[in-house]
Image (spheres, grey):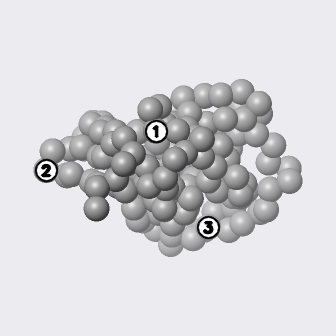
Amino acid sequence: MASKYREKEYNYIYCREQYYPYIPITIHGKKKGIFYALVDSGASMSLFHSSIAEDLGIALEDSEKVILIGICGVLESIQAYLKDKVQVSLEGLGTFSMPVAFTDHEFQDTLIIGREGFFENFEITFREWEKKLSLTPRRNLI
C-alpha cells in the first residue's frame, strides 16, 4: 500500500573516504540549530554530543544518567544523559519528538540517529547502489 505522505530523498554525503546516509535535521531547544546526522539502522538510540544540548539550551540536569555499551563498533561503555523527548524536524516532512542520549565522550563527533523514536515515524529506504536515502512519514507529523 502506497503512503499518502510526501517522500523526501537525500543523497549520501562523502565523509572519511566513504559515502554515508547523513540528513539535515533541526534540533529544537531554547534555540534551534541545523545539523547533519547519520541515520544508523544499527544504533538502537540516537546519540549526540552534549555540547549540542548546551549550545541550544537543552537542559540535561533533569536527564536520566545511563551507561551505553557497544558504541562505535567496540564494547566500550560510555556515560550519557538521556532526554526522553527532544524535538527535531526535517524540512518538508514535519516535527516530532524522539529520545536522545547526550554524551561528553570525545569520539562523539557525529550525530547518530538510531531506531528508537525515529524509525517508527518513517518508511526508510536505503539505496546503497545509488547512494540515496528516502524517508516517507508514516503519519502526519506536527
Q: Secondary structure at mark 1?
A: loop
Q: Which residue is mark 2?
A: 129
Residue drawn at 67 percent across, 47 percent down: 86
- Regarding mark 3 in the picture, which secondary structure is present there? strand
Picture layout, residue 134 above or below residue 101: above
Residue at left offset 24%, top offset 43% = 132
Residue 120 rendering spot, x and y as whole percentages: 48, 62
Whether tag 3 and tag 1 are in contact, CB under 8 A, the answer is no
Callout 2 environment at 10 Å: few (<14), some (14 to 19), or many (20+)?
A: few
Picture coordinates of residue 140, whole percent (x, y): 52, 47
- Assign a secondary structure to mark 2: loop
Residue 83 can be seen in this image: yes
The kind of residue tagged 2 is Trp
Mark 3 to mark 2: distance in Å?
32 Å
Residue located at (13% from left, 50% from top): 129
Vertical placement of 28 versus 21: above or below?
A: above
Pick the front one: 36 or 108: 36
Which label lies toward us, 2 or 1? 1
Q: Nearer the viewer, residue 32 or 78?
A: 32
Whether residue 21 can be seen here: no
Q: Crowdedness of circle 3 by 10 Å Cα count: few (<14), some, many (20+)?
A: some
Name the quadrant of the N terminus. Answer: bottom left
Q: Amino acid at mark 1?
A: Leu
Name the amino acid type tagged 3.
Leu
Disc marking residue 93: 1
Work out which quarter of the rendered image holds the C terminus and state it.
Answer: top right
